[in-house]
Amino acid sequence: MGFKVAIIGRPNVGKSTLFNRLVGKKLALVDDTPGVTRDRRVHAAKLYDLHFDVIDTAGFEDAAASTLPGRMRQQTEIAIREADLIFFTVDAKSGLMPDDRTFADVVRKSGKPVVLVANKAEARGAQGGLLEAWELGLGEPIPVSAEHGQGMPDLRDAVVEALGEERALGEDDEEDSGEIAASEVLIGEDIADPDAEPAYDDTKPLRIAVVGRPNAGKSTLINALIGEERLLTGPEAGITRDSISVDWDWRGRRIKLFDTAGMRRKSKVQEKLEKLSVQDGLRAIRFAEIVIIVLDATIPFEKQDLQIADLIIREGRAPVIAFNKWDLIDNPQELLAELREKTERLLPQVRGIQAVPVSAETGRGLDKLMESVIKTHKVWNSRVSTGKLNRWLEGILAHHPPPAVAGRRLKIKYVTQAKTRPPGFVVSCSRPDAMPQSYVRYLTNSLREAFDMPGVPIRMALRTSDNPFAGRAKKR
C-alpha cells in the first residue's frame, strides 16, 4: 500500500519546485512571486525506489478565514489531514521567519510524522539557515536543492526512517498518464478496420476539462459535481492558476476533471504568471477528450467565449456548453430559446452542440450536463463503415454534384473514415486543390445530418489517387 506526502511551508520556499522534482514533470506553476500555488494538487511521485502520492499546497499564511489567503490555508489544512507524512519546507537561503515557527507548531499538533526539508541549500550562505532550522524542534533538517536535484538520496533515507521500511517500501500502483500525440490533418486516432463499427465502451475512464473566462464559475461547477469543496472558490476573478485534476466517479464511471485558469483576451494578458496559467489551461484542453465551456448566463457569448470555443474545435476536442449562474436569470424560458439560437448561429462548425443551463451554486442541471457529456463523447468516438458512407455519397452526388471549375467537372470517387476522436474522413477526388470550400462544408453538414453526428468537429481531407501515367513521355 502506498502513502501520501504533503509539502507544507510558508510562501516562496520552493514547494512547487520540489513537487515537480518528485513527480518528474513540470506540472505545478513555478515563479518568483510568493503565493503562486492556491489549490492543492495531488500526483503520483517517485523518489528512487519509493512510490507515493505527493500533495502540493498553497503557502501557509496567517489570515482571516473569509479572505483568499484564509481559504487557501483551509485547503492546506485538509492536505495535512489527508497525508501520512509531511515535508515541512523552509528556505535555507533566507533562514527562519516568524511564520515558519508558527506553522511548525501547527504541523507538530497534527501528530503526523515530519521530515524537515531545508530547500535552496545550494545557495551561498545557506549553512546559517540550515543550522537555524534545528530551532523548530522537528528533527534534523535535510539540505536539498529542488531546483538542481541535490540532496535527494538523503531525503529518501529520511522518508524511510520517518515511516519505517515496511510502510515506505510497500508496493504502489503506478498510473500511466500518456501524452496526446501531435496533431495531423485529421487529428484523431487511426482506424484499423474501416468497415468495423464497434460498440461504445462506457467503462473506459473519461477526461473532461472545464474552461471559460475568469469568474464564470468553473471551480464552483467542479465542486458541485463531485460534492465537496475540493477547489478554491470565491467572488474574486482569477483564483485558479494551475490546471488541477480531480478524480471522480459518476454512475460507476471513472472521470478525471481538469479545472483550468480563466482565459482572458490575449491583449489583456501581460503578466508572466498569467501567461503560464493560460498555457497550462491549453495543455489541459489538449489532454482532455470532452471540454465543458462554462459561460456566464448573465453575459454569454462574449468575443472571448467564441475564441475559446474555436480553439477547442481546432484542437479536435468535443465541446459541451454549460450556461452557468442560471439561478440569477429572471426569464429562463425566453433566454434559453435565445441562447440556443445564438449557439447554432455563432458556432456553425459544431452544429447541434449540446448546451445545458446549470447552476453550480444550487446544483441544478448537473445530471443533465453529464448526460450531454456522455452523449457527445459517444458521437466523438463514432465510426461509420465505408459501405454506408459510399451509399450516402451516391445519393449526395445524384442530388447535388460538385461544380465545374475552369470548365472541367470535379469527380468524387469514394469516401472512407480514416480516424475517430474526432471523426475524420478522406474524400478521394480528381482535383483536391480546386474543390470549393463551400462544397466541402456541404458534404460535412450532410454527413453530420445523415449519420447523426451533432456537436463535434468533423474533419474532411481531400486526396487524389496517384496517376500511373503522370510524368511519362507521350509515345508517338
Image: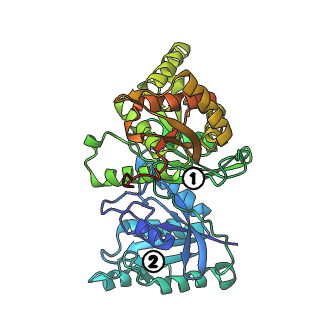
Name the element at disc 2.
strand
User: Left of 403 or right of it: where is 415?
Assistant: right
Name the element at disc 1.
strand
Pick out the residue farthest to the front. Answer: 476
Q: Can residue 355 be seen in this snapshot?
A: no
The N terminus lies in which quarter of the figure?
Answer: bottom right
Q: Which residue is labeled 1 in the image?
A: 189
Decide: is 61 above or below 360: below
Identity, as a three-letter code, of the amino acid under mark 1: Glu
User: Left of 315 or right of it: where is 379?
Assistant: right
Where in the figure is residue 263, as x and y percent of width and height? 38, 42
Q: Residues within 10 Å of mark 2 (few under 14, many from 20)?
A: many
Q: Which residue is labeled 2 in the image?
A: 117
Seen at 41% across and 78% down, the residue is 118
Where in the figure is residue 320, as x and y percent of width and height? 54, 35
Q: Which colour scheme appears in the figure?
A: rainbow
Q: Earlier in the sequence, mark 2 or mark 1?
A: 2
For residue 49, which quarter of the picture? bottom right
Identity, as a three-letter code, of the amino acid under mark 2: Val
Which mark identifies residue 391?
A: none
Seen at 51% across and 36% down, the residue is 412
